[in-house]
Image: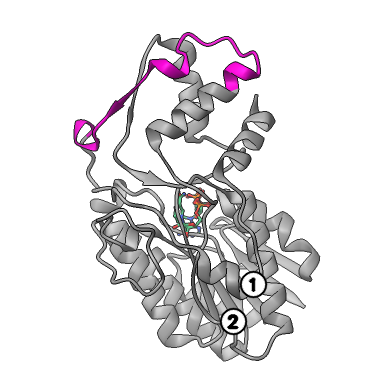
Amino acid sequence: MKVLLFGKNGQVGWELQRSLAPLGELVALDRHSTDFCGDLANLDGIRETVQKVRPQVIVNAAAYTAVDKAESDTATAHAVNAEAPGVLAEAASAAGAWLLHYSTDYVFDGSGDKPWEETDPTGPLSVYGRTKLEGEQRIAARCAQHMILRTSWVYAARGGNFAKTMLRLAAERDRLTVVSDQFGAPTGADLLADVTAHMLRSALAGSAAGFAGTYHVAAAGETSWHGYARFVLECAAKGGKALRASPDAVDPVATSAFPTPAVRPHNSRLNTSKLRGAFGLRLPAWQQGVARMLAEIT
Ligand code: NDP
């Protein structure tokens, strides 16, 4: 079996290189790959890649994720997040392959405090959210064998992340100010990659398109960025790390205090019942993954 992965060096893509390897022969690409085209802005190139590789499974972890930059770089965000998934869907359908793709809670308007269900009405607030939603719609229209995983607040041990920023600031300053009116669940790229491999195994062993559709996936529980920051500093303090700012020195602040080009949703909570029921999975509490990541990086 052949698995074709786009976006191999992103947070999720890096972990997928590990979790997808046991499924079969893995062809993993990024935008600079020279053996096959992995640049999602090159629509003819990625179509040709699918035709040449002839995979049974395509996983797309590449995306235009610079949420603020997307507000002004609309054409590129649209090509990568909306048009490219549509092309991958057409190519997957022609090859008889499964397409697994990632999307975001930013397809919703962030209102209320109820965890979003897959069937809730969408209402993106930003170019990023709108282009990701269009990507979902193009996939659903063009490839029956698809799985779209909407997630939120993704972190990874590799590269920069919110926890590392908090630790750096807490070493430099006596007090920190962190947004307390956006809610979600920090979700590890490693968890997403493991869930992906499990879903693909089930889909490949199951009946035709029985598992096709959109699923919400996030770690269990919820917090605000303020609660997340406090947790990071609590873990660091327990681990004996010397910091100037204690967990109690993290001050809550409203989103409106930090204006950004793209509007962020206040409610990023995702209801994961559908995924857990369909695939027999248990999703761990967000604190478990964050504590593990902190143990790896400190
Ligand atoms: P990252 O930003 O870590 O990775 C995205 C990858 O896409 C990067 O390696 C980037 O490469 C690559 N990329 C960008 N443009 C292109 C292009 N034209 N051709 C090929 N590759 C390209 O994102 P995550 O791993 O966190 O995100 C994975 C998925 O999860 C995405 O679909 C994202 O929308 C979704 N998601 C992410 C969330 C988050 O908090 N991060 C939250 C919710 C959903 P390069 O580094 O070269 O730019």
Q: How would you rate the neighbour count of disc 2 (Cα within 10 Å): few for under 14, some for 14-19, many for 20 or more?
A: many
Q: Nearer the viewer, mark 2 or mark 1?
A: 1
Q: Which portion, as a residue range, is magenta?
A: 236-258
Badge number at residue 279: 1
Q: Nearer the viewer, residue 249 or 33?
A: 249
Q: In the rendered image of this protein, does residue 54 appear above or below residue 27?
A: below
**Could you tell me the amino acid type at mark 2?**
Phe
Q: Answer yes or no: disc 2 within 8 Å of ligand 1.
A: no
User: Is residue 238 shown in magenta?
Assistant: yes
| Residue 98 x/y as whole percent | 61, 80
Q: Residue at x 33, y 72 (%)?
A: 134
- SS of the residue at dot 1? helix
Q: Nearer the viewer, residue 130 or 179?
A: 179
| Residue 115 x/y as whole percent | 39, 58
Q: In the rendered image of this protein, does residue 268 appear above or below residue 39?
A: above
Badge number at residue 211: 2
User: Is residue 117 shown in magenta?
Assistant: no
Q: Nearer the viewer, residue 138 or 193?
A: 193
Residue 188 in sight here: yes
Is the C-beta separation of discs 2 and 1 under 8 Å?
Answer: yes
Horizontal side of 209 relative to 63 (left or right) equals right
